[in-house]
Image (cartoon, rainbow, N blue to C red):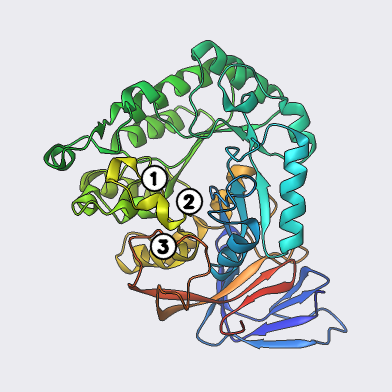
Amino acid sequence: MSQRIRIHGGRVIDPANQVDTRQDVYLADGRIVGLGHPPEGFAAELEIAAEGQLVCPGFIDLSARLREPGDEHKATIASESRAAAAGGITTVCMPPDTCPIIDTPAVVQLIQDKAALAGQLRIQPIGALTRGLKGQDLSEMSALKEVGCRAVSNATAPVANTLVLRRALEYAASHDLLVIVRPEDRDLADQGCAHEGPIATRMGLRGIPYAAETVAVAQVLALIEHTGARVHFAQLSSARALRSIARAREKGLPVTADVAIHQLHLTDEAIKDFDANTHLRPPLREASDRDALRDGLRDGVITALCSDHQPHEPDAKLDAFPATEPGIATLQTLLPLTLALVEAGTLTLNQALAALTSGPAAILGLQSGLLSVGNVADLCIFHPEQPWTLNGDTWLSEGRNTPYWGQTMKGRVTQTFLGGVRVFELNAR
């Protein structure tokens, strides 16, 4: 049950409304009912002191695999909802490569029911672009849109050929659906497990060249001009692909892009010890790519950060490096790693929070990611300087596959609200 809540003493940052000031925030009936001053007759049932902390919209994560349905041995919607709430995340987009695939309204409804039962997170299911993600027959996009899908994607699965891709983009455009593309040419990737470069060569690992990403980006960009489809490029990893997208945006093509937060910190140097927690897809690239992606985020070519959360059970990371499953568990590191970019001078605090709130909201066409009177009260409160260590006492995801385990980070969420209901409170569990 939502309460009448007054949050006082905090620094309120709302990039969408260009707000950065100390003011009180008032919540009632699941919505924001006052900023600075309470509405007439308001009497708070709960007073929250936020001195020394920041109050901002809840974060929107454009890619997080919660493993349910289908891979509950790795994680569940309930477990990862808790981790998301602890990370200040109030909305996540779930890619369609669940089991069963998100290609029917029934699967969308199943996920939404599970999210409602957990009660800590909004889930935006991404519908499948093709049936079963097999890359051949188009999915029933209109039916998926009717049950709430705002976007469609083939996740990491390839599309059979460019004709199918063109038809898919045309069909999506006819229903005003965003198409999310994780650009990789499967043939050029050739079962690689690391960036194709000197480090992979020395380690005897099969590499994934830049061309696997740039060719896929170029192909889609060419088809956008024919179809008019809105396309979002997800989890970029290379400077070359970024440049192509920048040129497309300059030409006015309807394209956007995001980057996973770990790609802005780690490089292929991190794989030197065969740490399976650095086995990622797309792979960690060179330092020059990391720096270019940082510049792209600062300059507005990239408008959103995502976690690309992929929790795994311990056995998934215990084999030889190429045989392990790629991915990092990242929901609770999204905020501190983003704040580290502010500390490094890469982004201003407002730019950083925009990439977690208003940026992804605009990509999806959501009426969230901002603090306006009348809006649903999805918000978080965090202490930007509070240190915390990733360990069994602080980590809520079922997946512990992170190269940051045991490290101390700075920036911790203290409270998260979903629809005016407090779904996370530090030290309350």
- Residue drawn at point x = 73 percent, y = 64 percent: 119
Disc 2 to disc 1, C-alpha distance: 8 Å
Say whether marks 2 and 3 touch (CB < 8 Å). Answer: no
Q: Nearer the viewer, residue 70 or 163?
A: 70
Q: Which residue is mark 2?
A: 310
User: Image quadrant of residue 120?
Assistant: bottom right
* Residue 338 visible, this orientation: yes
Mark 1 and mark 3 lie on one chain; the one further toward the N terminus is 1
Say whether marks 2 and 1 touch (CB < 8 Å). Answer: yes
Q: Residue 41: x percent and y percent?
A: 88, 84
As helix, strand or loop, the secondary structure at mark 2 comes to loop
Say whether marks 1 and 3 touch (CB < 8 Å). Answer: no
Q: Which residue is mark 3?
A: 338
Q: Badge 2 local density, few (<14 within 10 Å), some, or many (20+)? A: many
Rendered-image quadrant of the N terminus: bottom right
Q: Badge 1 local density, few (<14 within 10 Å), some, or many (20+)? A: many
Residue 326 bears which disc, if any? 1
Query: Which kind of residue does numbered mark 1 sit on?
Result: Pro
Q: Nearer the viewer, residue 33 or 131?
A: 131
As helix, strand or loop, the secondary structure at mark 3 comes to helix
